[in-house]
Image: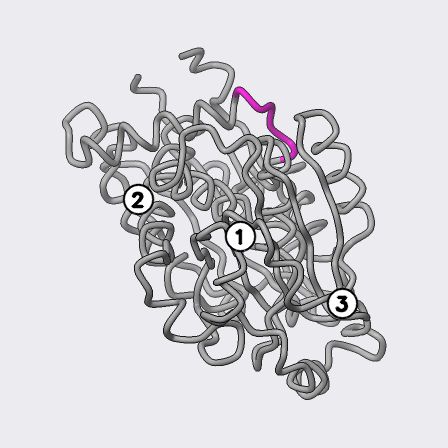
Amino acid sequence: MEQQRYYGRDLICTQDWERDELEEILRLARKMKEHRYSPKYTELLLHRTFLMFFYNPSVRTRQSFEAAATELGGHAQFLEPGSMRLKSSNTAGETIEDAAKVMSRYAVGIGIRILEDRIAKYGDGDEFLREYASWANIPVLNMADDKFHPFQGLADVMGMRENISEDMRGKTLLQYWGHGALARSWCSVQESLLINSRMGMNIVLAYPDGYDLDPDVIALTKKNCQNNGGSFSISHDPLECYRGADVVYSRNWMSPRAYDNGFDKQKEIKQALTHPEWICDHEKMRHTNNAYFIHPMPVDRKHEVTDEVASGERSLIYDIAENRLHIQKAVMALTMSTEW
């Protein structure tokens, strides 16, 4: 392993890293999972601190990052921006430049989670992370922004390889819009499109009219498919798209209209619930190639997917949730440790 290749690196989107670098993360995560408490790994961040900015709440993200820091011998410090004097568009306070430079002297890494309802327009969250990264001289890790969720994408890949095949080339992923009551951001879905198209999978993106994703991400996904031997298609049929799928990922996402007059969550939810036919259920799964079901959680059961599928024997949701811990340990070790 060329440790200097990774040390100090930011991870904001998997598309920013080379394919072989992503493979190194996945290899190390597998080793860390197999030898979870091995002394080889438990002191890599001994006495070191990882700072976590949570503009949005979480379940798995906070738990898994705190556990990751602990298992590497370090400490994760939970920060609520609302309790800090930080400059914003309508309040005075410390600038990103000053905050990032000072925090770089306290810790070995910074994680930031900022989603759709904490920003004025699409893209602001991702830009916010990249500004922190431009000023910090320690790694900045994306714990989910409004565009990308790299740790979820890597955990998805790890889970599919463990349960389906080490080589997912030629397998078909159905990225399916599920109707739901949460008005979710595009981050997990777009990360899935980007990373799985680089792994040689065939991508079928299915959604009702009016739920298009970021056109730049779609263009990158198409290019990734062309470069890695996969295919890309879009369907607006809630049933036909299931035919031939090896993996089904049913997840709600908001429409591009969500920011027309500020983020209107209730309007988005009301509109999404007018499409009850867009749910992953057992009958639709019968049209697949005996597909596995994946989801980043939390699952909006009875909207995105039925309990029968989400809790069925072909569901990988708990394996993937577990893998978030090991993927995060691997990235933190590669980018923040000098103890190899």
Q: Can you tell which mark lies on residue 68?
A: 2
Mark 2 element type: helix
The answer to whether the residue labelled 1 contacts the one labelled 3, judged by CB atoms less than 8 Å apart, is: no
Task: Tell me where the magenta segment starts and ends, as one range.
Answer: 15-20
Is 333 contained in the magenta span? no
The amino acid marked with disc number 1 is: Ile
Q: CA distance from mark 1 to mark 3?
A: 27 Å
The amino acid marked with disc number 2 is: Ala
Quarter of the figure with residue 230: top right
Q: Looking at the picture, does residue 59 appear above or below residue 269?
A: above
Q: Quadrant of the N terminus?
A: top left
**Residue 70: horizontal and vertical position, in percent?**
24, 44
The amino acid marked with disc number 3 is: Tyr
For the residue carrying disc 2, how many other residues have a C-alpha within 10 Å: few (<14), some (14-19), or many (20+)?
Answer: many
Q: Which residue is mark 1?
A: 112
Q: Can you tell which mark lies on residue 211?
A: 3
**Residue 305: horizontal and vertical position, in percent?**
48, 72
For the residue carrying disc 1, how many other residues have a C-alpha within 10 Å: few (<14), some (14-19), or many (20+)?
Answer: many
For the stretch drawn in magenta, what is the main secondary structure? helix
At a point 47% along the width and 25% down the height, the residue shown is 23
Query: Viewer-nearest of labels 1 and 3?
Result: 3
Foreground residue, 143 or 258? 258
Q: Quadrant of the C terminus?
A: top left
Q: Give the mark, 2 or 1, whose residue is nearer the N terminus.
A: 2
